[in-house]
Amino acid sequence: MPIATPEVYAQMLDRAKAGGFAYPAINVTSSQTLNAALRGFAEAESDGIVQVSTGGAEFLSGATVKDMVIGASALAEYARVVAAKYPVTIALHTDHCPKDKLDGFMRPLVDISLERVSKGLDPLFQSHMWDGSAVPLEENLEIAKELLDKCHRANIIMEMEIGVVGGEEDGVVGEINEKLYTTTDDALATAEAVGIGEQGRYMLAATFGNVHGVYKPGHVKLRPPVLKDIQDAVGAKYGKDKPFDLVFHGGSGSALEEIHEAITYGVVKMNIDTDTQYAFTRPIAAHMFTNYDGVLKVDGDVGNKKVYDPRSYGKSAEAAMAARVAQACQDLKSAGTKIA
Protein backbone atom coordinates (compact mmCIF):
# COMPACT_ATOMS: atom_id res chain seq x y z
CA MET A 1 0.00 0.00 0.00
CA PRO A 2 1.15 3.57 -0.59
CA ILE A 3 1.23 6.16 2.16
CA ALA A 4 -2.35 7.23 2.92
CA THR A 5 -3.86 9.98 0.81
CA PRO A 6 -5.69 12.75 2.71
CA GLU A 7 -8.98 11.07 1.84
CA VAL A 8 -7.84 7.65 3.05
CA TYR A 9 -6.41 9.12 6.26
CA ALA A 10 -9.76 10.72 7.02
CA GLN A 11 -11.41 7.37 6.32
CA MET A 12 -8.97 5.66 8.70
CA LEU A 13 -9.87 8.01 11.55
CA ASP A 14 -13.60 7.70 10.82
CA ARG A 15 -13.36 3.89 10.86
CA ALA A 16 -11.49 3.92 14.16
CA LYS A 17 -14.06 6.12 15.85
CA ALA A 18 -17.02 4.19 14.50
CA GLY A 19 -15.39 0.81 15.13
CA GLY A 20 -14.25 1.43 18.69
CA PHE A 21 -10.51 1.18 18.15
CA ALA A 22 -7.50 3.49 17.98
CA TYR A 23 -4.35 3.54 15.88
CA PRO A 24 -0.92 3.26 17.49
CA ALA A 25 1.18 6.26 16.46
CA ILE A 26 4.77 5.04 16.60
CA ASN A 27 7.61 7.52 17.08
CA VAL A 28 10.61 6.70 14.89
CA THR A 29 14.10 8.19 14.72
CA SER A 30 15.73 6.23 11.89
CA SER A 31 15.04 4.17 8.79
CA GLN A 32 15.46 1.04 10.91
CA THR A 33 12.86 2.02 13.51
CA LEU A 34 10.56 3.00 10.65
CA ASN A 35 11.00 -0.47 9.15
CA ALA A 36 10.23 -2.01 12.55
CA ALA A 37 7.01 -0.01 12.80
CA LEU A 38 5.91 -0.99 9.29
CA ARG A 39 6.67 -4.64 10.02
CA GLY A 40 4.70 -4.52 13.26
CA PHE A 41 1.64 -3.01 11.60
CA ALA A 42 1.82 -5.58 8.81
CA GLU A 43 2.12 -8.49 11.25
CA ALA A 44 -0.93 -7.22 13.13
CA GLU A 45 -2.84 -6.55 9.89
CA SER A 46 -3.44 -3.02 11.11
CA ASP A 47 -3.13 0.31 9.40
CA GLY A 48 -1.23 2.81 11.48
CA ILE A 49 0.53 6.10 12.03
CA VAL A 50 4.27 6.73 12.01
CA GLN A 51 5.44 9.97 13.56
CA VAL A 52 8.59 11.94 14.17
CA SER A 53 9.29 14.53 16.86
CA THR A 54 11.44 17.64 16.54
CA GLY A 55 14.37 15.84 18.17
CA GLY A 56 13.78 12.73 16.11
CA ALA A 57 13.73 14.78 12.91
CA GLU A 58 16.96 16.55 13.84
CA PHE A 59 18.58 13.18 14.58
CA LEU A 60 17.38 11.80 11.25
CA SER A 61 19.20 14.57 9.39
CA GLY A 62 22.53 13.49 10.91
CA ALA A 63 24.58 14.82 13.79
CA THR A 64 26.42 17.20 11.44
CA VAL A 65 23.41 18.65 9.61
CA LYS A 66 21.00 18.83 12.59
CA ASP A 67 18.12 20.21 10.51
CA MET A 68 14.62 19.20 11.57
CA VAL A 69 12.98 19.94 8.22
CA ILE A 70 15.64 18.01 6.29
CA GLY A 71 15.33 15.02 8.62
CA ALA A 72 11.54 14.96 8.52
CA SER A 73 11.47 15.36 4.75
CA ALA A 74 14.01 12.56 4.29
CA LEU A 75 11.94 10.24 6.48
CA ALA A 76 8.77 11.02 4.54
CA GLU A 77 10.41 10.34 1.18
CA TYR A 78 12.03 7.11 2.39
CA ALA A 79 8.74 5.97 3.92
CA ARG A 80 6.95 6.46 0.60
CA VAL A 81 9.30 4.00 -1.04
CA VAL A 82 9.44 1.25 1.58
CA ALA A 83 5.84 1.46 2.85
CA ALA A 84 4.59 0.62 -0.65
CA LYS A 85 5.85 -2.94 -0.09
CA TYR A 86 3.69 -3.55 2.98
CA PRO A 87 0.03 -4.66 2.86
CA VAL A 88 -1.20 -1.93 5.22
CA THR A 89 -1.86 1.79 4.95
CA ILE A 90 0.37 4.19 6.87
CA ALA A 91 -0.12 7.87 7.66
CA LEU A 92 2.84 10.15 8.41
CA HIS A 93 2.65 12.61 11.29
CA THR A 94 4.93 15.06 13.10
CA ASP A 95 4.76 15.03 16.90
CA HIS A 96 4.91 17.82 19.51
CA CYS A 97 5.95 21.16 18.02
CA PRO A 98 6.10 23.93 20.66
CA LYS A 99 5.86 27.62 19.85
CA ASP A 100 9.62 28.22 19.68
CA LYS A 101 10.04 25.53 17.02
CA LEU A 102 7.10 26.41 14.76
CA ASP A 103 9.19 28.47 12.33
CA GLY A 104 11.91 25.81 12.17
CA PHE A 105 9.69 22.74 11.90
CA MET A 106 5.93 22.71 11.44
CA ARG A 107 5.44 25.85 9.34
CA PRO A 108 8.16 25.01 6.76
CA LEU A 109 6.82 21.45 6.45
CA VAL A 110 3.30 22.73 5.84
CA ASP A 111 4.73 25.12 3.23
CA ILE A 112 6.32 22.15 1.45
CA SER A 113 2.94 20.42 1.42
CA LEU A 114 1.18 23.54 0.12
CA GLU A 115 3.61 23.60 -2.80
CA ARG A 116 3.09 19.88 -3.42
CA VAL A 117 -0.69 20.23 -3.36
CA SER A 118 -0.51 23.14 -5.81
CA LYS A 119 1.18 20.72 -8.23
CA GLY A 120 -1.50 18.06 -7.78
CA LEU A 121 0.52 15.93 -5.36
CA ASP A 122 -0.40 14.70 -1.88
CA PRO A 123 0.98 16.59 1.13
CA LEU A 124 4.34 15.47 2.47
CA PHE A 125 2.83 14.55 5.86
CA GLN A 126 -0.79 13.71 6.53
CA SER A 127 -0.92 15.48 9.89
CA HIS A 128 1.12 17.78 12.11
CA MET A 129 0.88 18.54 15.83
CA TRP A 130 0.89 22.02 17.27
CA ASP A 131 1.74 21.80 20.96
CA GLY A 132 0.53 24.97 22.65
CA SER A 133 0.34 23.45 26.10
CA ALA A 134 3.12 25.71 27.40
CA VAL A 135 1.33 28.96 26.51
CA PRO A 136 -1.94 30.41 27.84
CA LEU A 137 -5.04 28.83 26.32
CA GLU A 138 -6.07 32.04 24.56
CA GLU A 139 -2.71 32.23 22.77
CA ASN A 140 -2.75 28.49 22.11
CA LEU A 141 -6.10 28.79 20.32
CA GLU A 142 -5.10 31.91 18.41
CA ILE A 143 -2.07 30.13 16.97
CA ALA A 144 -4.10 26.96 16.41
CA LYS A 145 -6.61 28.88 14.30
CA GLU A 146 -3.86 30.25 12.04
CA LEU A 147 -2.19 26.86 11.69
CA LEU A 148 -5.45 25.01 11.10
CA ASP A 149 -6.31 27.29 8.18
CA LYS A 150 -2.92 26.65 6.61
CA CYS A 151 -3.13 22.89 7.22
CA HIS A 152 -6.64 22.76 5.77
CA ARG A 153 -5.43 24.42 2.57
CA ALA A 154 -2.66 21.80 2.35
CA ASN A 155 -5.08 18.86 2.87
CA ILE A 156 -3.45 18.16 6.24
CA ILE A 157 -5.16 17.20 9.49
CA MET A 158 -3.85 19.18 12.44
CA GLU A 159 -3.40 17.88 15.97
CA MET A 160 -3.46 20.26 18.92
CA GLU A 161 -3.18 19.92 22.67
CA ILE A 162 -5.15 21.57 25.45
CA GLY A 163 -4.11 20.90 29.00
CA VAL A 164 -0.62 19.62 29.76
CA VAL A 165 0.97 16.19 29.42
CA GLY A 166 3.33 15.77 32.35
CA GLY A 167 6.93 14.58 32.13
CA GLU A 168 9.37 15.48 29.38
CA GLU A 169 9.71 14.72 25.69
CA ASP A 170 12.30 16.35 23.44
CA GLY A 171 12.66 19.35 25.74
CA VAL A 172 8.92 19.92 26.16
CA VAL A 173 8.39 19.72 29.92
CA GLY A 174 4.99 19.46 31.58
CA GLU A 175 4.69 19.89 35.32
CA ILE A 176 2.59 17.39 37.23
CA ASN A 177 -0.25 19.57 38.54
CA GLU A 178 -3.94 20.32 37.98
CA LYS A 179 -3.27 21.23 34.34
CA LEU A 180 -2.88 17.51 33.63
CA TYR A 181 -6.68 17.46 33.48
CA THR A 182 -8.40 19.36 30.66
CA THR A 183 -11.61 21.09 31.73
CA THR A 184 -14.92 21.30 29.88
CA ASP A 185 -14.43 25.08 29.73
CA ASP A 186 -11.14 24.50 27.87
CA ALA A 187 -12.92 22.21 25.42
CA LEU A 188 -15.80 24.65 24.86
CA ALA A 189 -13.33 27.46 24.22
CA THR A 190 -11.51 25.25 21.71
CA ALA A 191 -14.68 24.47 19.79
CA GLU A 192 -15.60 28.16 19.73
CA ALA A 193 -12.17 29.17 18.43
CA VAL A 194 -11.44 26.49 15.82
CA GLY A 195 -14.83 24.83 15.28
CA ILE A 196 -15.53 21.12 15.30
CA GLY A 197 -14.39 20.37 11.77
CA GLU A 198 -16.01 23.02 9.61
CA GLN A 199 -12.85 25.18 9.67
CA GLY A 200 -10.62 22.19 8.95
CA ARG A 201 -10.28 18.78 10.52
CA TYR A 202 -8.14 18.40 13.60
CA MET A 203 -7.41 15.90 16.36
CA LEU A 204 -7.43 16.99 19.97
CA ALA A 205 -4.96 15.83 22.62
CA ALA A 206 -7.02 16.52 25.73
CA THR A 207 -5.28 15.55 28.93
CA PHE A 208 -6.63 13.35 31.71
CA GLY A 209 -3.55 12.75 33.86
CA ASN A 210 -1.15 11.71 31.10
CA VAL A 211 2.62 11.73 31.66
CA HIS A 212 5.38 11.20 29.09
CA GLY A 213 8.06 8.64 29.79
CA VAL A 214 8.14 5.72 32.19
CA TYR A 215 6.06 5.67 35.33
CA LYS A 216 4.57 2.99 37.50
CA PRO A 217 0.79 2.63 37.69
CA GLY A 218 -0.49 4.78 40.53
CA HIS A 219 2.22 7.47 40.20
CA VAL A 220 -0.26 9.67 38.36
CA LYS A 221 -3.98 9.05 38.38
CA LEU A 222 -5.52 8.78 34.95
CA ARG A 223 -9.13 9.92 34.78
CA PRO A 224 -10.59 8.76 31.45
CA PRO A 225 -14.08 10.12 32.35
CA VAL A 226 -12.58 13.59 31.81
CA LEU A 227 -12.73 12.77 28.08
CA LYS A 228 -16.40 11.83 28.33
CA ASP A 229 -17.19 15.09 30.12
CA ILE A 230 -15.45 17.05 27.35
CA GLN A 231 -17.26 15.21 24.56
CA ASP A 232 -20.62 15.51 26.32
CA ALA A 233 -20.29 19.24 27.02
CA VAL A 234 -19.26 20.20 23.51
CA GLY A 235 -21.57 17.64 21.92
CA ALA A 236 -24.57 19.04 23.79
CA LYS A 237 -23.81 22.59 22.65
CA TYR A 238 -23.29 21.69 18.98
CA GLY A 239 -25.67 18.75 18.65
CA LYS A 240 -22.99 16.25 17.68
CA ASP A 241 -22.07 12.96 19.33
CA LYS A 242 -18.36 12.76 20.28
CA PRO A 243 -17.41 15.88 18.31
CA PHE A 244 -13.67 15.53 18.92
CA ASP A 245 -11.22 13.01 17.44
CA LEU A 246 -9.16 12.49 20.59
CA VAL A 247 -5.49 11.57 21.00
CA PHE A 248 -3.98 9.74 23.99
CA HIS A 249 -0.47 10.97 24.89
CA GLY A 250 1.80 9.68 27.63
CA GLY A 251 0.29 6.21 27.91
CA SER A 252 3.28 4.19 29.14
CA GLY A 253 2.28 2.32 32.29
CA SER A 254 -1.43 2.75 31.66
CA ALA A 255 -3.69 -0.13 32.61
CA LEU A 256 -5.36 -1.80 29.64
CA GLU A 257 -8.82 -1.09 31.03
CA GLU A 258 -7.97 2.63 31.16
CA ILE A 259 -6.86 2.55 27.53
CA HIS A 260 -10.03 0.76 26.47
CA GLU A 261 -12.20 3.17 28.43
CA ALA A 262 -10.50 6.14 26.74
CA ILE A 263 -11.19 4.60 23.33
CA THR A 264 -14.93 4.42 24.11
CA TYR A 265 -14.87 8.20 24.59
CA GLY A 266 -13.51 8.88 21.11
CA VAL A 267 -9.74 8.31 21.24
CA VAL A 268 -8.63 7.40 17.71
CA LYS A 269 -4.83 7.75 18.09
CA MET A 270 -2.47 6.76 20.89
CA ASN A 271 1.19 7.75 20.86
CA ILE A 272 3.72 4.98 21.53
CA ASP A 273 7.37 5.86 22.09
CA THR A 274 8.92 4.84 25.42
CA ASP A 275 7.80 1.21 25.14
CA THR A 276 9.03 0.78 21.57
CA GLN A 277 12.35 2.47 22.37
CA TYR A 278 12.97 -0.09 25.09
CA ALA A 279 11.82 -2.96 22.87
CA PHE A 280 14.32 -1.88 20.20
CA THR A 281 17.25 -1.39 22.58
CA ARG A 282 16.81 -4.43 24.84
CA PRO A 283 18.06 -7.08 22.34
CA ILE A 284 20.98 -4.83 21.40
CA ALA A 285 22.04 -4.72 25.05
CA ALA A 286 21.71 -8.51 25.29
CA HIS A 287 23.80 -8.92 22.14
CA MET A 288 26.57 -6.70 23.51
CA PHE A 289 26.70 -8.41 26.90
CA THR A 290 26.61 -11.87 25.37
CA ASN A 291 29.21 -11.12 22.70
CA TYR A 292 31.44 -8.63 24.51
CA ASP A 293 34.60 -10.42 23.46
CA GLY A 294 33.44 -10.36 19.85
CA VAL A 295 32.25 -6.76 19.61
CA LEU A 296 35.40 -5.56 21.42
CA LYS A 297 38.97 -6.24 20.39
CA VAL A 298 39.88 -7.51 23.85
CA ASP A 299 43.61 -7.71 24.72
CA GLY A 300 44.59 -6.86 21.17
CA ASP A 301 42.54 -9.65 19.62
CA VAL A 302 40.67 -9.05 16.36
CA GLY A 303 37.12 -9.50 17.66
CA ASN A 304 34.41 -11.13 15.60
CA LYS A 305 33.20 -9.18 12.60
CA LYS A 306 29.99 -11.19 12.46
CA VAL A 307 28.86 -9.87 15.84
CA TYR A 308 30.00 -6.26 15.53
CA ASP A 309 28.40 -5.93 12.10
CA PRO A 310 25.42 -3.63 12.92
CA ARG A 311 23.15 -5.92 10.93
CA SER A 312 23.72 -8.77 13.41
CA TYR A 313 22.05 -6.95 16.28
CA GLY A 314 19.95 -4.62 14.14
CA LYS A 315 17.81 -7.51 12.92
CA SER A 316 16.99 -8.53 16.49
CA ALA A 317 16.18 -4.94 17.42
CA GLU A 318 13.83 -4.57 14.46
CA ALA A 319 12.05 -7.83 15.24
CA ALA A 320 11.58 -6.94 18.91
CA MET A 321 10.25 -3.46 18.17
CA ALA A 322 7.93 -4.88 15.51
CA ALA A 323 6.53 -7.31 18.07
CA ARG A 324 5.85 -4.42 20.46
CA VAL A 325 4.08 -2.47 17.72
CA ALA A 326 1.94 -5.52 16.96
CA GLN A 327 1.12 -5.78 20.66
CA ALA A 328 0.04 -2.13 20.65
CA CYS A 329 -2.32 -2.88 17.77
CA GLN A 330 -3.84 -5.70 19.84
CA ASP A 331 -4.16 -3.46 22.89
CA LEU A 332 -5.82 -0.67 20.91
CA LYS A 333 -8.07 -3.12 19.01
CA SER A 334 -6.81 -2.05 15.58
CA ALA A 335 -5.37 -5.50 14.77
CA GLY A 336 -7.13 -7.09 11.81
CA THR A 337 -8.89 -3.86 10.78
CA LYS A 338 -6.71 -2.84 7.81
CA ILE A 339 -8.54 -1.13 4.96
CA ALA A 340 -6.80 -3.08 2.17
Image (cartoon, rainbow, N blue to C red):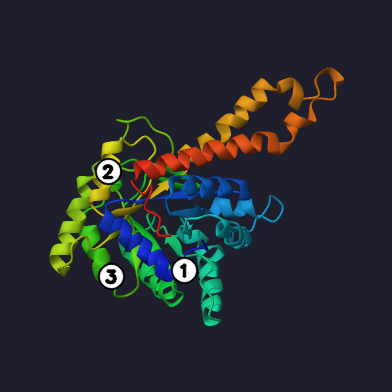
Quarter assignment of residue 7: bottom left
SS at badge 3: helix
Left or right: residue 289 versus residue 274 is: right
Give the distance between the C-alpha atoms of the residues marked 3 and 2, in whole angstroms: 30 Å
**Residue that numbered label 2 is attached to:** 260
* Number of numbered discs: 3
**Is any atom of residue 250 visible in this view?**
no
Mark 1 or 3, nearer chain start: 1
**Residue that numbered label 1 is attached to:** 5
What residue is drawn where x is 36% and y is 65%?
11
Q: Which amino acid does the dot numbered 3 rest on?
A: Ala
Asked if the residues shown at circle 3 and circle 2 are in contact, with their CB atoms under 8 angstroms apart, the answer is no
Q: Which amino acid does the dot numbered 2 rest on?
A: His
Q: Which mark is residue 293?
A: none
Q: Is residue 324 above or below residue 185?
A: above
What residue is drawn where x is 40% and y is 55%?
338
Q: Nearer the viewer, residue 248 or 47?
A: 47
**Residue that numbered label 3 is attached to:** 193
- Residue 21: % across, % down: 31, 51
Q: Which amino acid does the dot numbered 1 rest on?
A: Thr
- Residue 141: % across, % down: 33, 66
Quarter assignment of residue 304: top right
**Within 10 angstroms of label 3, few (less than 14), some, or many (20 or more) residues?**
some
Asked if the residues shown at circle 2 and circle 1 are in contact, with their CB atoms under 8 angstroms apart, the answer is no
- Residue 55: % across, % down: 56, 51
Give the distance between the C-alpha atoms of the residues marked 2 and 1, in whole angstroms: 28 Å
Question: Which of label 3 and label 2 is nearer to you?
Answer: 2
